[in-house]
Image (cartoon, coloured by chain):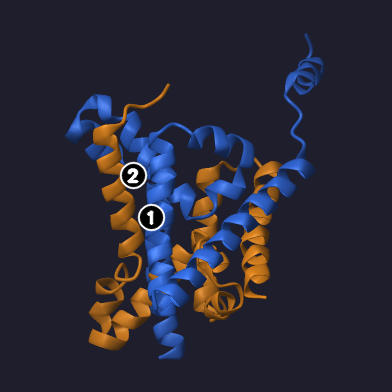
C-alpha cells in the first residue's frame, strides 16, 4: 500500500470531530459554570455579608470540593469527554486532574504512588504557572517599580 | 448584568480553548498550561483585574486566574519584603487553590476506589 493510500484510509477511519458542536458546548458549559459561580458569589455577599475577595475564595474552595467529589464518585470523566474545554478550563479541571491522579496511582502505595504521582497531570500547570509568574514578576518590578 | 458578563467571560475562555484544541494537536494539559501563562501575562499587562471587575466569578473560575494569582502574589511579596518577596510571596494567593485541591484529593482517595 502506498503512503497516500494509507493516509487516505487513516483519514477515513479517524472519527470526525464536530468542531462547531464542540465549540458551542464548551461555550455554554463554561459560561454556565461562570454564571452559577456568580450566583453563588452574590448569595455569599448578600446573605453571609462576605467581602468580595472572600466570596471568590470560598467559591474557589467550593468548586474544587465539588469537582474532586465528582471525580472520586466517577462522574467527572464522562462529563469531561462530553463538555471538553467547558469543564477542564475552569478550576474544576485542576481539581479533577489532581484527584484523578491520586485515585489512579493509589494502588502503588502512599509514597511511591500518590506521593510521587499526585501532580502528574496538574504538574505542568503548576510548573509553567510558577515560572511565568516569577519571571513576569521580575519584569513587572523592573518596569513598573 | 454581572451575571451575563460572568457567563460571557467564562464561556469565551472555554470557547477559545476548545477551538485551540480541535484545530491543533494540543492536549488538555497543553491548553491549561497555555491559559495559566496567558493569565499571568494578562495580569502583567494589568488587564486581569479589570476582567474580574467585569466578569466577576466568570473570570476567577478560569484556570487563567491561577496565573493572575501567582503574578499578583509575586508583586505583593515584592512590595512587602523586597526582592525575596518575589519568590516568597509568589504562592501566597494561589495557596488556597493548591492546598484545597491536594487535601480534597487525598481525603477522597482514602474513601473512594477508582471506578474503572
Rendered position, A30 above or below A97: below
At a point 68% along the width and 65% down the height, the residue shown is: B8
According to the picture, the residue beneath numbered tag 1 turns out to be A126
Q: Identify the hue of chain A.
A: blue
As drawn, the chain in orange is B
- CA–CA distance in space, label 1 to label 2: 9 Å
Q: Chain of mark 1?
A: A
Q: Are marks 1 and 2 in contact (CB under 8 Å)?
A: yes
Residue lying at 79% horizontally and 44% vertically, measured from the top left: A20
Q: Quadrant of residue B71?
A: bottom left
Q: Is residue A131 visible?
A: no
Q: Earlier in the sequence, mark 1 or mark 2?
A: 2
Residue B7 screen position, x and y as percent: 65, 63
* Image position, residue B12 (x, y; %): 68, 60
Taking depth in this image into account, of B101 and A51 the one nearest to the observer is A51
Q: For mark 2, name the chain.
A: A
Q: Is residue A29 left or right of residue B68?
A: right
Q: Locate the C terminus of chain A by quadrant.
A: bottom left
Per the image, the residue denoted by label 2 is A119
Amino acid at each position: 500500500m502506498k503512503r497516500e493510500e494509507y493516509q487516505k484510509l487513516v483519514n477515513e477511519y479517524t472519527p470526525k470531530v464536530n468542531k462547531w458542536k464542540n465549540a458551542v458546548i464548551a461555550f455554554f458549559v463554561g459560561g454556565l459554570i461562570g454564571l452559577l459561580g456568580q450566583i453563588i458569589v452574590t448569595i455569599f455577599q448578600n446573605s453571609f455579608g462576605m467581602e468580595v475577595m472572600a466570596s471568590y475564595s470560598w467559591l474557589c474552595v467550593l468548586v474544587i470540593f465539588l469537582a474532586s467529589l465528582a471525580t472520586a464518585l466517577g462522574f467527572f470523566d464522562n462529563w469531561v469527554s462530553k463538555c471538553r474545554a467547558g469543564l477542564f478550563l475552569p478550576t474544576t479541571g485542576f481539581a479533577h486532574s489532581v484527584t484523578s491522579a491520586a485515585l489512579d496511582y493509589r494502588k502503588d502505595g502512599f509514597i511511591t504512588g500518590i506521593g510521587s504521582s499526585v501532580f502528574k497531570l496538574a504538574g505542568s500547570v503548576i510548573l509553567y504557572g510558577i515560572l511565568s509568574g516569577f519571571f513576569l514578576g521580575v519584569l513587572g518590578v523592573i518596569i513598573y517599580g | 448584568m454581572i451575571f451575563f458578563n460572568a457567563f460571557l467571560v467564562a464561556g469565551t475562555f472555554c470557547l477559545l480553548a476548545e477551538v485551540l484544541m480541535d484545530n491543533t494537536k494540543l492536549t488538555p494539559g497543553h491548553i491549561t498550561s497555555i491559559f495559566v501563562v496567558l493569565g499571568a501575562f494578562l495580569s502583567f499587562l494589568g488587564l486581569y483585574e479589570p476582567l474580574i471587575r467585569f466578569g466577576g466569578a466568570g473570570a476567577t473560575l478560569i484556570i487563567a486566574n491561577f496565573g493572575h494569582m501567582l503574578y499578583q502574589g509575586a508583586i505583593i511579596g515584592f512590595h512587602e519584603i523586597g526582592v525575596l518577596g518575589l519568590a516568597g510571596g509568589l504562592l501566597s494567593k494561589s495557596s488556597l487553590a493548591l492546598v484545597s485541591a491536594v487535601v480534597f484529593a487525598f481525603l477522597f482517595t482514602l474513601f473512594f476506589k477508582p471506578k474503572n
